[in-house]
């Protein structure tokens, strides 16, 4: 393949990583905001809320990482 | 690590000396490596790959035994014996058959990451032997120092991870697995943060193996506790029977996505930090300018601190997600039993 397709592959990998990070950042930001709100309303449940928040954050992060791994594969297999 | 970063040329040179020492004839390989290897890929291979030798910087290098299954089992003491054996050889850091340069059927060689796993097991063994000795000698006195820390972490895993998710009844039976996986992952992650060390969890095969144990745990405990019939019933997701053709494939896929997500999450988290540090330090080489160095080193120090947090957090997340999945696979049955008590 020529250098143009290589350039497009790099562009796709970079764009894909950036876009997936936007989604993950929105998700985790919203999650943290609501968790803080919930802790503010009910401080005695903060331990429970924190655990649930970390699990949910890990799940969101996992989806974003799938996307990043796909981008990395694109990057490394571009020829 | 210093050696790899000196310059792009340096990387290809060190790379080349290694390949030529492995194969003997260096000239043709030299050109191929130089033409093929991008800096990024070379750094990745150098720093996170599975090496056939175990070493620490340039101080020492131990050649590890090779075990290859390819029409029978071939076992070689080291690379030299492998080359002398005449059936396999190294080509571009990859173990291949000598005649047609295709990879063998199954390569079970001991690699540097395996040695790091053994190191983690050894450290854990020593730590728990030391902690256990205290309890054997004087079981009624409160522990101090290192033993107290171990006790605290075990208490954390038991009370905050396993008990809320799995229920009181099974906690003590399943605790060894969760403790084992928690401490093993934490030790492997932290080994990667030592200067010159590699994190075995930064390799997809290692995390996949860990996730396979988690998968066996989730399904095994589920079948053991609720019975095979109820386990099959769970596959319909509690929907009416005429929805089974749709529900069963979805639930079957759901069984495998959980450990798959565990695999990718741990691998990507451990790899991402290393890649960011490599990229930041790579900026120095890219601009060939000394004034970029303070910023790059400062940022990479910050990422390093973040990696320390991530190393602890990912062990916690792997363990708690496994516990949550076990709890989910038990379904309402775990709750029933705990309310009966």
Image (cartoon, helix red, strand yellow):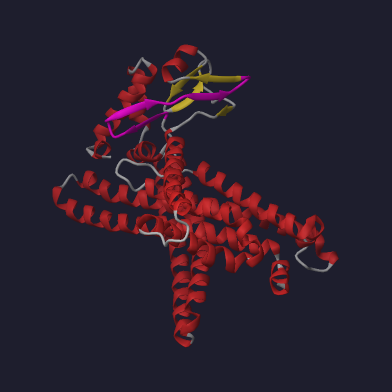
Pick the front one: B118 or B132: B132
Pick the front one: B22 or B28: B22
x and y percentages locating residue B78 in the rendered image: 43, 20
Which quarter of the rendered picture does the C terminus of chain B lie within? Answer: bottom right
Task: Please say if B178 is above or below B21.
Answer: below
Question: Does the segment drawn in magenta span residue A21?
Answer: no
x and y percentages locating residue B74 in the rendered image: 56, 19
Task: Please say if B28 is above or below B44.
Answer: above
Furthest residue toward bottom: A41
Which region shows up in magenta?
A: B52-72
Which residue is rendered at x = 48% and y = 68% of the image?
A54
Decide if residue B109 is on the left or right side of residue B339. left
Question: Does the segment drawn in magenta span residue B56?
Answer: yes
Decide if residue B170 is on the left or right side of residue B295. right
For residue B311, what is the image quadrant?
bottom left
Task: Please say if B337 is above or below B185.
Answer: below
Which residue is rendered at x = 61% and y = 62% of the image?
B171
Residue A63 shows up from this direction:
yes
x and y percentages locating residue B149 in the rendered image: 40, 59
Which quarter of the rendered picture does the N terminus of chain B lie within? Answer: top left
Which residue is rendered at x = 50% and y = 60% of the image?
B317
Pick the front one: A45 or A78: A45
Task: Please say if B313 is above or below B84.
Answer: below
């Amino acid at each position: 393949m020529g250098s143009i397709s290589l350039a497009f592959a790099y562009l796709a990998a970079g764009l894909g990583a950036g876009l997936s990070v936007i989604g993950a950042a929105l998700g985790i930001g919203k999650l943290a905001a609501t968790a803080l709100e919930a802790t503010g309303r009910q401080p005695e449940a903060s331990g429970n809320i924190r655990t649930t928040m970390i699990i949910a954050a890990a799940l969101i992060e996992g989806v974003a990482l799938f996307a990043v791994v796909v981008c990395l594969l694109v990057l490394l297999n571009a020829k | 690590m210093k050696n790899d970063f000196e310059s792009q040329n340096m990387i290809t040179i060190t790379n080349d000396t290694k390949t030529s020492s492995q194969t003997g004839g260096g000239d043709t390989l030299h050109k191929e490596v130089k033409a093929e290897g991008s800096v990024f890929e070379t750094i990745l291979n150098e720093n996170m790959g599975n090496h056939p030798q175990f070493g620490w910087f340039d101080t020492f290098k131990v050649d590890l035994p090779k075990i290859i299954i390819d029409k029978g089992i071939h076992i070689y003491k080291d690379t030299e014996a492998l080359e002398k054996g005449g059936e396999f050889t190294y080509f571009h850091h990859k173990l291949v058959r000598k005649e047609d340069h295709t990879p063998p059927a199954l390569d079970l060689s001991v690699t540097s990451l395996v040695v790091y796993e053994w190191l983690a097991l050894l450290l854990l063994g020593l730590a728990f032997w030391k902690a256990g000795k205290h309890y054997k000698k004087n079981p009624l006195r409160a522990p101090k120092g290192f033993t107290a820390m171990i006790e605290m972490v075990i208490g954390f895993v038991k009370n905050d991870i396993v008990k809320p998710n799995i229920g009181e009844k099974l906690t003590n039976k399943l605790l060894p697995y969760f403790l084992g996986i928690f401490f093993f992952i934490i030790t492997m992650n932290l080994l990667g943060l030592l200067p010159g060390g590699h994190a075995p969890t930064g390799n997809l095969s290692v995390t996949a193996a860990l996730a396979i144990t988690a998968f066996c745990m989730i399904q095994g405990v589920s079948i053991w506790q609720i019975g095979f019939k109820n386990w099959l019933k769970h596959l319909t997701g509690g929907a009416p029977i005429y929805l089974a053709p749709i529900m069963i494939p979805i639930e079957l896929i759901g069984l495998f996505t959980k450990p798959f997500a565990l695999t990718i999450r741990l691998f990507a988290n451990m790899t991402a930090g290393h890649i960011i540090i490599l990229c930041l330090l790579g900026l120095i080489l890219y601009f060939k300018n000394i004034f970029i160095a303070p910023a790059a080193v400062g940022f990479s120090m910050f990422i390093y601190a973040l990696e320390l947090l991530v190393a602890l957090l990912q062990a916690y997340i792997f363990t708690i997600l496994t516990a949550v999945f076990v709890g989910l696979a038990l379904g309402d049955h775990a709750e029933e039993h705990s309310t009966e008590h």
